[in-house]
């Protein structure tokens, strides 16, 4: 017996859902996320697909690898820029070697016309600054940092273009205090997509850049990934300090000092402390490898 036109349509619709992974589960607010949405008093952007970018006048200057900005654009497709909006929906691979600084928690083709929202909020006092101060001192413990300004931009349960019903939640947090600047990238549940994706940051001429390795099928694992041992969070220091690292000098009395395991541990601890002061995440581990030169 043949199927009715309605039954055929439903069967085809279910098959498409299965193939594209559009069936999603209910999401809860990730524990790594900073406050957002109506509860936080966010300004919600009215997104019109790729053309939407929201200009935000910053309450405090934000230093990004030596350049100071007083505004940023929260772009629809999962990234921030500073000099101009960026409507491009297909991401370029970092390093771009271009003329724009880009912070991209998840640069991909986003469509919020049917689902999700994009919002932002700034803070110059209160519990969010306390939270930011605590987080940065945990990840970079030798800086004695105090946050004076925070910007939180959130893409909440947004869907990918051509994949109705998909949901992805992610967030970028800009944190400033004096001459020091940091960014946090927070990830909740994110559905996979066949669209192009890019995550990380890039600078003018790509003098500095960092890439979070991600692909369409890896996106759901972002909620478990980290560079600071906090699942779903990546932290970066982004002022000019990392560019000033030329070298670290350590003095030992004799070569035998490095042949004793207890001394090696001490040397690595001191080296790590110096590197963390200059921006290396405190979770990074240094290992000592002995290379023995033999005569021919």
Image: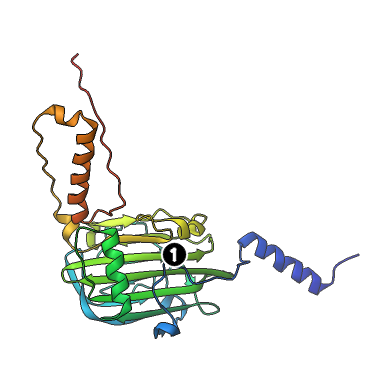
- The residue at 17%/56% (across/down) is 243
User: Splitting the image into 4 quarters, where does residue 52 fall?
Assistant: bottom left
Q: Could you say where residue 116 lies in the image, as x and y percent from the top left?
A: 51, 77
Q: Which residue is mark 1?
A: 187
Image quadrant assignment for residue 214: bottom left
Percent coordinates x, y for residue 49 in the rendering: 47, 77
Q: In this image, 141 relative to 111: left or right?
A: left
Q: Against 267, is 108 above or below?
A: below
Residue 46 seen in the current view: no
Single out the residue that lies furthest toward the top. Answer: 296
Using residue 95 as the reference point, say whether residue 65 is left or right of it.
left
What's the residue at 41%, 80% (across, down)?
119
Q: Quadrant of the N terminus?
A: bottom right
Position of residue 161 relative to residue 246, above or below, is below
Secondary structure state at the residue bearing disc 1: strand
Residue 55 % position (x, y) = 31, 81
Percent across and percent down for residue 278 are 18, 55
Q: Nearer the viewer, residue 40 or 50?
A: 40
Depicted 86 relative to depicted 291: above or below: below
Extreme residue toward the right, this view: 1
Residue at point 16% right, 71% down? 178
Q: Residues within 10 Å of mark 1 (few under 14, many from 20)?
A: many
Q: Is residue 2 above or below residue 112?
A: above
| Residue 295 shown left or right of residue 226 in the figure | left
Lateral position of residue 30 relative to residue 74, left or right: right
Front-most of 45 and 204? 45
Q: How many marks?
A: 1
Residue sitting at the far front: 262
């Amino acid at each position: 017996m043949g199927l009715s036109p309605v039954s055929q349509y439903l069967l085809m619709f279910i098959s498409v859902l299965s193939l594209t992974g559009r069936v999603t589960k209910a999401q809860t607010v990730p524990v790594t996320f900073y406050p957002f949405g109506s509860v936080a008093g966010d300004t919600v952007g009215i997104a019109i697909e790729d053309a939407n970018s929201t200009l935000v006048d910053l309450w405090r200057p934000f230093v990004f690898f030596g350049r100071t900005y007083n505004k940023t654009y929260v772009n629809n497709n999962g990234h921030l820029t500073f000099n101009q909006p960026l409507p491009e929906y297909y991401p370029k691979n970092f390093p771009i070697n271009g003329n724009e600084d880009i912070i991209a928690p998840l640069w991909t083709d986003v469509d919020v016309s049917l689902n999700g929202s994009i919002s932002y909020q700034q803070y110059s006092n209160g519990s969010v600054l306390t939270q930011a101060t605590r987080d940065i001192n945990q990840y970079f413990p030798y800086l004695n940092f105090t946050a004076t300004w925070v910007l939180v931009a959130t893409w909440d349960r947004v869907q990918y273009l051509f994949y109705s019903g998909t949901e992805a939640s992610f967030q970028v947090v800009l944190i400033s205090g004096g001459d020091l600047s940091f960014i946090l990238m927070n990830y909740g549940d994110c559905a996979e997509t066949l669209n192009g994706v890019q995550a990380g940051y890039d600078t003018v001429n790509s003098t500095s850049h960092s890439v979070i390795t991600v692909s369409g099928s890896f996106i759901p694992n972002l909620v478990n990934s980290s560079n600071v041992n906090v699942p779903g969070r990546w932290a970066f220091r982004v002022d000019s300090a990392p560019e000033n690292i030329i070298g670290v000098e350590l003095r030992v009395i004799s070569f035998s000092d490095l042949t004793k395991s207890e001394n090696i541990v001490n040397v690595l601890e001191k080296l790590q402390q110096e590197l963390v002061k200059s921006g290396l995440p405190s979770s990074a581990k240094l290992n000592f490898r002995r290379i023995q030169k033999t005569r021919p």
